[in-house]
Image: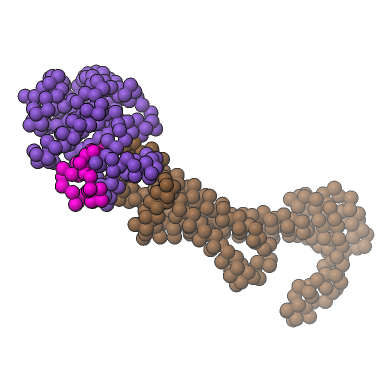
Chain colours: A purple, B brown
Amino acid sequence: MIRLDHVTKTYPKAARPSLDDVSVSIEKGDFVFFIGPSGSGKSTIIKLLLREISPNRGKVNVNGKEISSMRSWKIPHFRRSIGCVFQDFRLLPNKTAYENVAFALEVIGKSKAVARRVVPEVLELVGLGGKEHRYPHELSGGEQQRVAVARAFVNRPLILLADEPTGNLDPDTSIEIMRLLDRINRTGTTVVMVTHDSNIVNQMRRRVIEIEGGRIVRDQARGVYG
Amino acid sequence: MRAKYVLSEVLVGLWRNVTMTIAMMITMTVSLSMLGASLLMYRQVDKMRAYYYQEVEVSIYLKGDVTPEQRSALDGRLHADPLVKEVFYEDKQMAYENFQKMFQDAKDMVESVSAAEMPESFRVKLNDPKQFTAINQQYREAEGVQSIVDQQQLLQKVFDVLGAIQSLSLIVAAVMGIAALLLVANTIQVAAYSKRREVAVMKLVGASNWFIQMPFVLEAVFAAVLGSLLAGGLLIVTKVFVLEGSLQALTNLLTPVDWGDVWLMFPILAGVGGLISAMTAWITLRFYIRV
């Protein structure tokens, strides 16, 4: 499903590479944590998988597609098979929960009729039934992140990327978000999550890949934060 | 639904930044009307050339003491000359009548001259009006010839003036055009910045590039097309109130500007303005919205 093959990424003007000869393979339906200190290169992986950046060396293969050399006009279509949530939610403040999710469908060409059918369903799934018409500022942080998850998942992507999704949330809310991600994972969606929240990693007992200084220093099937 | 989305984005975008939109439209209007004026002038000079070249004559004035033999010799030569299309002899009396007609407002001038003082002349039409030099060389030294005048040279001065006005309006069009394009680029940057959140989400969920960029590009095109309509309106106003109003006398001398040509300016200006600002917007976006 996801394969990084001897990937090296050095940002322009950076003294040392963010990722240094990293190879990793993630199967369909996996739930994987990338952990490590700030600046270790975790977020670079998310950016590579979204094809926001390209590696200097090595190959990135997602959904059977070689994306490191993908032509730029093909990237939008590729991204439709990937959902993504971030620490800062990235919701549109002038749109309601419903509109935020529907927007993601409309801009990729889905009709309003499709949105009317699918959006309430996914909002129900993330536990926001009845709050469809609230604006982001009328929702708690956890609820906002649920909207973001709904938006990422509404298109039923094969892969869900999560870049520190609990970074702005208190521990209890974080656990609720993790339950949600777990439920999404059980539908067969591959989940890749970058975090340094040790509580969560220890509770979930899923595959843990630890990165330090741009290199993989640990890869455990049912790991803890350590 | 997508068309509706794009259209509402365009209108909201223009309205959000309405002072900039107006500035953009005014500069476009000035630039495009100048462009339109110089295009019309170009057509006009062309038409005038064609028109006047049919009418243009070379006048061979004869000396006061020209003998009948010299006159008929010249007449024979001119008729036989392959460069010459038509020859018309104007005697003293006809010249005087023309003179009277031309200066009918200046009685003193007419009265001070008698028919005997008017020069006789051959009015010659050339097959090719540009062959004046050849005619001039052949007949300048002929017996009984006083002087040879080419109307084309007078006409050329008029064309030179028109050409200068045309260049000037093209320069103004270019300078205002650059200002308009900078405003387009700026407007697009502001629009892209004010919609950066939406753009970020659209990129994230995989909206196609054209879908992201279309509202911005259309915003620029919309302003350009409005500007071109105003510019066309300005040309009409100029034709009605200036060319056919205060400058009536001059317009009669020049050939009149056809309505057809003026209407033709609308699609041309809209096309030129729309295309150039669309390209400017698109290039600007390539710097501000990367994949």
Q: Is residue A177 visible?
A: yes
Measured as percent of width and height from the top left, residue B210 is found at 41, 40
Q: Is residue A160 above or below residue B115?
A: above
Range of magenta residues: A125-152
Residue occupying image coordinates x 87% and y 67%:
B91
Of residues A23 and A81, which is closer to you in this image?
A: A81
Horizontal side of A82 relative to A183 (left or right) equals right
Query: Which of the 4 image quarters holds residue A148?
Result: top left
Q: Give the number of marks.
A: 0
Residue at the (24%, 24%) spot, across then down: A29
Q: Residue furthest left?
A: A226
Residue at (26% x, 22% y) in the render: A28
User: Left or right: A220 with respect to B113?
Assistant: left
Quadrant into which the N terminus of chain A falls:
top left
Residue B279 falls in image quadrant: top left
Q: Is residue B253 above or below residue A19?
A: below
Q: Is residue B234 magenta?
A: no
Q: Taking B274 as reference, is B147 left or right?
A: right
Residue B248, quarter of picture = bottom right
Q: Residue at x 13, y 19 (%)?
A: A220
Q: Which of A18 and B12 lies nearest the eye of the viewer?
A: B12
User: Residue A77 appears at what percent x and percent y?
Assistant: 37, 32
Q: Quadrant of the C terminus of chain A?
A: top left
Answer with left or right where residue A84 lies relative to residue A108.
left
User: Is A148 a magenta residue?
Assistant: yes
Q: Of residues B98 and B9, which is closer to you in this image?
A: B9
* Vertical arrangement, residue B174 with respect to residue B252, above or below: above
Pinpoint residue B67: horizontal percent, then vertical percent. 91, 63
Please say whether residue A213 is visible from this viewpoint: no
**Residue A192, above or below B109:** above
